[in-house]
Image: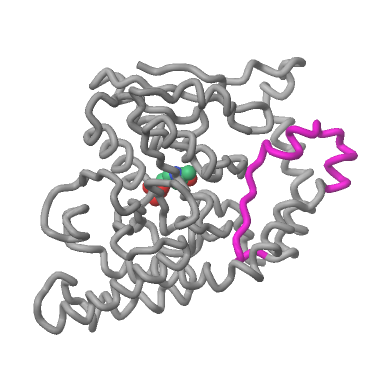
Amino acid sequence: MWPIYLDNNATTRADPAVVAAMLPYFSEQFGNASSAHAFGSEVAGAVKQARKSLQALLGTALDHEIVFTSGGTESDNTAILSALDNQDGRDEIVTTAVEHPAILSLVERLGTLRGIKTHLIGVDSRGQLDIEAYRRALGPRTAIASAMWANNETGTLFPVERLAAMAHAAGALFHTDAVQAIGKIPIDLKATEIDMLSLSGHKLHAPKGIGALYVRKGAPFNPLIHGGPQERRRRGGTENVPGIIGLGKAAELATARMVEELPRVRAMRDLQPSHVLLAMNVPMPALRGAVRFSMSHDNTDDDVDQVLHVLPDIIAGLRASSPSWQERPRAAPASPFRSKELV
Ligand SMILES: Cc1ncc(COP(=O)(O)O)c(C=O)c1O
């Protein structure tokens, strides 16, 4: 029996079609996309095509709104640091308490090193953002508001179109970490006020070490990495051509699969809890969220059935060996995700 992989929010398997598309760019097509000769121009053409595929997935109007990066972490760091360096008199950040460490550890460090104040907006027990606290935190000193589109642990979607409009009303830029949303929900950036968006290839059946940052035309922008003229001087360093080609192919596949695959993956994710687990009296919050299973189009209904079949014994075994289960608190602990300020 093949191992069943249900942790697709951590990473996905590179699609065989993605790997096949990348392979020539390690061998025959090894040129540097910036070279003026034929080796370079052919590769540059392929990079251009990959950018177009990503544009189609994101619904962006212009190819130069996409900057290839090394992944979600670099894109997130670039967005926040660029916004801070670009707007006189605006030196505060508004973000959420449930962001990925790519945002949270950066803002914490900015507080320590540069005294940058960050407002961390909390969520309720269903993972929904405290919109009023978000509104109150935005002000004349806000450089950027950043909120993830989909949460990597719970899958909760934040209303980022609305959050972007609210940030703009306060004169601030808006960034979203869409690493967990891309390829899973339809996105049309042209129809939103989002200024910057981060994505990562390895959550999308492309390889690790490639990602992109969308930067709306006209949004003030400073590179994080300075070097050569690559990416219109917005990200120095020779392009990761095989990675870019892989990301382009993955974007093309995701666009094509969006209609037929999404309902299937969603249905697998939302199966009702197993009757066996219910019979074991596992409390509903634990049933719904304590273990993260995340699906991709690689999974089948059989995978899910098999996991549900073996899970009760695994849980029983874990509980038997876990002192914390025996000593578990009767009342729910206070949420660590209340709004707070970091300086
Ligand atoms: C929401 C979110 N943002 C950012 C990242 C970081 O992306 P990368 O691994 O490409 O740096 C991840 C990866 O787990 C993520 O889930």
| Relative horizontal placement of residue 155, taking residue 62 as reference (left or right) | right
The answer to whether 42 is drawn above or below residue 183 in the figure is: below
Provide the residue span drawn in magenta: 274-299
Which quadrant of the figure has residue 60? bottom left
Q: Nearer the viewer, residue 94 or 71?
A: 94
Residue 309 drawn at (x, y percent): 79, 53
The residue located at (60%, 60%) in the rendering is: 296
Residue 330 drawn at (x, y percent): 77, 16
The residue located at (73%, 54%) in the rendering is: 307
Q: Nearer the viewer, residue 326 or 259?
A: 259
Which quadrant of the figure has residue 260? bottom right
The answer to whether 262 is drawn above or below residue 340 in the figure is: below
Q: Nearer the viewer, residue 307 or 114?
A: 114
The residue located at (69%, 35%) in the rendering is: 318
Residue farthest toward the front in the current orientation of the protein:
169
| Relative horizontal placement of residue 237, taking residue 265 as reference (left or right) | left
| Relative horizontal placement of residue 29, taking residue 305 as reference (left or right) | left
Residue 33 drawn at (x, y percent): 18, 72
Instruction: Answer whether residue 234 is magenta in the image.
Output: no
Q: How is the image coloured?
A: one colour
Q: Nearer the viewer, residue 277 or 258?
A: 258
The residue located at (64%, 49%) in the rendering is: 293
The answer to whether 89 is drawn above or below residue 279 in the figure is: above
Residue 130 drawn at (x, y percent): 59, 26
